[in-house]
Amino acid sequence: MEEILVFKTNASRKTKLEDLHILLSADPRIKSWNFDFWDRDNIFRVVSLGITSQEIIEILYSVNILASELL
């Protein structure tokens, strides 16, 4: 079943997202994703199938984006 995971991040419009795009596109469990830079918490949303929030946090961290899940 698809799940929507939501995170607060330190990303910004100036963050280079090319590396993140490559990592997320390579994972078949990630169906879609987006950032909301209009939100003060720079929200990152992921529609996923069977990936944990911790795995997403680790992927973001690997490209120097800090994140915490919003419940």
Image: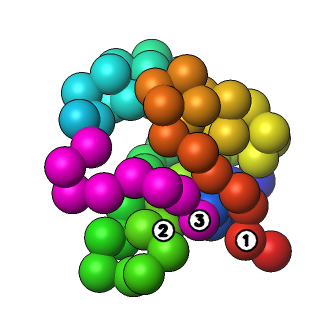
Which residue occupies 50% across, 74% down? Answer: 41
Residue 8 - label? 3
Vertical position of residue 30 compared to residue 40: above or below: above
Q: Main secondary structure of the magenta part?
A: loop
| First-in-chain label (2 vs 1) | 2
| Residue pointed to by mark 2 | 43
Type of amino acid at the residue the image marks with label 2: Ile
How much space separates mark 3 and mark 2, taking CA atoms?
Answer: 5 Å
Q: Secondary structure at mark 2?
A: strand
Q: Is residue 10 magenta?
A: yes
Please state the horizontal and vertical placement of residue 71, each as a whole percent of the image: 80, 74
Q: Is residue 3 left or right of residue 15?
A: right
Q: Residues within 10 Å of mark 3 (few under 14, many from 20)?
A: some
Vertical position of residue 50 compared to residue 33: above or below: above
Q: Are marks 3 and 2 in contact (CB under 8 Å)?
A: yes
How much space separates mark 2 and mark 1, taking CA atoms?
Answer: 9 Å
Which residue occupies 76% across, 46% down? Answer: 53
| First-in-chain label (3 vs 1) | 3
